[in-house]
Image: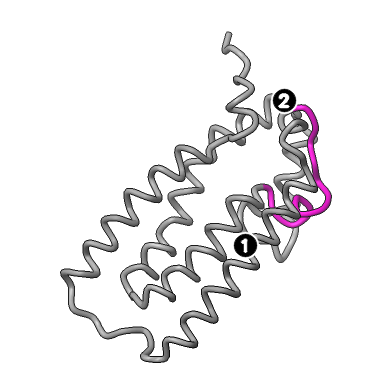
Amino acid sequence: MESPPSKIRMIFGSGPTGLAVSIVLFVVAVWLTGHIPLPLLSDNRNLLNSIFVIASLLTLAIIIWSVKSLPPADRGRKLSTSGAFRYVRHPLYAAFLSVFNFGLAIWLNSYILIIWAVLLHPLWHYIVRDEEKIMTDLFGEEYQEYQKRTGRFLPRLAER
């Protein structure tokens, strides 16, 4: 019989593992950027800065919305399917994967970092599997129905 997940695991989920993997791959992508000569995304520094600021602010807004939708003290105790969780099952991860990382890649003016941001999506789908198994164990059929209605990191356009 498996032991229940720790309080730390319930609060932080797959975040620390995913963050560590993302940072290692970011360092590799930055190294590759310095060693593979590719053209810049843009010569317009103001445009790149503006995109990064907008992505950062949007990421911050999603994080705040997510925490308000499900405070850390309620994680693992309550299944939230409203607020930010109405649209995606992992809004905190989605904020970074779908918004911030692309803003960062554009700001750093690198095609290789755009590829890094794209490749993180399937990797994170793998990383959160254990977290979703814990949620299924805790909330059963209710969580499985929720999975059918919402995407992991991007809103689902059509219900399964």
Residue at x 52% of width, y 74% of height: 52
Which quarter of the rendered picture does the N terminus lie within? top right
Q: Is residue 124 magenta?
A: no
Residue at x 68% of width, y 48% of height: 89
Considering every residue shown, the one lying at the far bottom of the view is 44
Across and down, in percent, residue 15 comes to 53, 41
Dot 2 falls on a residue whose secondary structure is: helix
Residue at x 72% of width, y 25% of height: 138
Q: Nearest the camera: 146 or 159? A: 146
Mark 2 → mark 1, Cα distance in angstroms: 28 Å
Q: Is residue 87 magenta?
A: yes
Q: What amino acid does circle 2 point to?
A: Leu
Q: What amino acid does circle 1 point to?
A: Thr
Residue at x 56% of width, y 66% of height: 99
Q: Nearer the viewer, mark 2 or mark 1?
A: 1
Left or right, 55 with reference to 69: left
Residue at image mark 2 = 138
Residues drawn in magenta: 77-89
Left or right, 133 with reference to 156: left
Residue at image mark 1 = 59
Which quarter of the rendered picture does the C terminus lie within? bottom right
